[in-house]
Amino acid sequence: MSINWLKYRKNLRGRDPLGVQAINIHLYSVLIPGITNVTDRLRYYSFFPWILKLYKDENIKLDFVPFLRRAEFLFSVITNYHHISEPSWSGHMVGTMVIGQVISELNENKKITLSKYTGLDEGPHRYFKNRLGGFGQYYLGVLVAMQILSRKESLEFVLYPRGLELANAFNAGNSKDQFISCILNDKVTTKELDAIKDDLCACNLKRNSVEYKLLADYLRAGDDPYVQEPTFMRRSSLALMFMMLKQIQKTTDYWELLNFLYYGMSENKKKFKVPDNLSDTANLWKYYVQHEFFSMALLSIFIGAQHLLDERQLGRFDIRANAWKKLVLGCDNNNLQESLKPCLAKLKKDPTLKEFLDYLDSSYKLEKVWESNALSEISISSFLSGKQYPADALFVGGLVLMCLVLRAVKDLEKEPAGANFHGLFNQYPINLKKLREDYKNKWNSAKVSEVAGELIVDYVLNQHIEVAIRKLYTEGLATFRFLREDELYRHSEIEFDYVGKTSPRLRESLQMMADLRIVDESKNGFSITDESIGTKYFEGVVSGT
Ligand SMILES: [Zn+2]
């Protein structure tokens, strides 16, 4: 087979070269529906309906597009101005790119001209390229999906009853008229900002206000009439995060929470037991974490193979032997983290996979998994994704991580309940299920070198070519890292990959919970100061609260 004609197409890196992250992306969309990686602040869900209603009610004599752009930009300026000394509270607003300029201009001149930043012409000041700004690019899809509004014409929107309710509830205090006059006069002064910042900041969600209640219900999909079945998962996911934050008793980021859930033990030795009624949700999150480790292991092996093929072309059988010889037997101990060094010594003797897994079992200590340089999934995956390591270190690290994942899944009988993965597993055939089945059917008594060879050829090279062919046909993109010519693999011109993670919507979810004061956000992560708010909020979601 010759695929030389690919040379004439534009090469692009593209994402997910092994089609292995797709399963996780599906998983978190099931676990946290309705929140995306660009919908960070809860008050936008009432702000935009309010703006749309305002435009009609006040009979605004300014075209809709400049009105909308100035309004959402001003909302962001107000929020940043209100929290000038505590940036975590002003983060995640639309137009962050130019906010630094705006603040220094305010410091200097005590005023800014809005259209300087909100005009559509390209330039160093433009806050957003999309004509409809962050509303159009980030929030519109979700607002439509959640039946808050609909789009009638390209610039005409209709509020559904739920949207109307949110618009009416938006608490602008006494600042509405001043907000509108700033937009119409195309400027805002620090004096005006001082007057309206308390009312019109994204943080202004007063508990006991109607606006707070509606947004809180929206996020929790509580007892409101618009609740749809899938949002049940979102509620359970948020409750789980809240309970873990309460338990861990320190400031933490969402990855740390996920690992806490995965191991049932935190870095500060707190234990976590999942409440019965959240166990389906928790199991899916654990599966997500495990698949994440699996995906990082494969990517590391993939990068090792890329380096090898960059040196010379190899056939499918040569690459197995060469990878083992060069990347394992020739691996330089100095490149490895401490816990991998004894593993390498063991690997060099080429034990059977079973012997190697037994060795991992006997060396694995739950109470030590969080330590840096530990023989654990957390430690090795952070080593792999930490910086650019040499190919041999990535390869050995990937191989050991893969064996740790296998160690944990080999005895499982089936995938976790609660979501139908059947179709997904067929579409993306490199997954934990395959790993487990290959262990049972083929690798039980195989040598590690044979397994490493299969990982390179079946899990990585062939799989990548499958995925890249699919991308070529469906999207017209040539993302091939390797070309296969007459059974020889050759590295393409695309630069080497790096070991990355997917990003579940937990940071955004926790940020929204911070807007409701259920959790607190600081630059190091999230914590809880007043747990009574969340306990009340999740009443009934968690049994026993
Ligand atoms: Zn504020």
Image: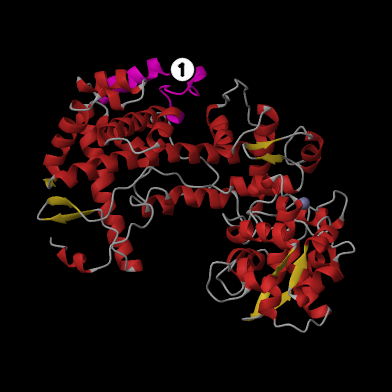
Indicate the quadrant where residue 210 lies. Answer: bottom right
Name the quarter where the C terminus is drawn: top right
Residue 377 location, x and y as percent? 43, 29
336 or 17, nearer to the observer: 336
Task: Name the residue beneath numbered marker 1.
Answer: 365
Residue at 69% x, 73% y: name it: 68
Q: Is residue 509 visible?
A: yes
Residue at 26% from the left image edge and 37% from the top image edge: 391
Q: Is residue 399 above or below residue 231?
A: above
> Which residue: 17% across, 67% down?
5
Q: Is residue 44 visible?
A: no
Q: Is residue 441 above or below residue 14?
A: above
Callout 1: SS: loop
Colouring rule applied to residues = secondary structure
Q: Estimate how packed mark 1 is, as few (under 14), some (14 to 19) or many (20 or more) residues with alpha carbons within 10 Å.
A: few
Instruction: Classify residue 105 as left or right of residue 82.
Output: left
- For the residue pair 297 and 125, the one nearer the viewer reads as 125
Residue 253 on image: x %, y %: 59, 37
- Dominant SS type (magenta): helix
Asked if residue 286 is among those painted magenta in the image, a careful observer would answer no
Question: Would residue 153 be found to the left or right of residue 190 on screen?
Answer: left
Question: Mark 1: which amino acid?
Answer: Lys
Q: Quadrant of residue 454?
A: top left
Please state which of residues 38 and 19 is positioned toward the viewer in this rendering: 38
Quadrant location, the N terminus: bottom left
Q: Is 359 placed above or below 254 here? A: above
Q: Is 374 included in the stretch rendered in magenta?
A: yes
- What range is drawn magenta here? 353-378
**Which residue reaches farthest front?**
108
Residue 282 location in percent, x, y? 58, 37
Between residue 55 and residue 486, name the one nearer to us. Answer: 55
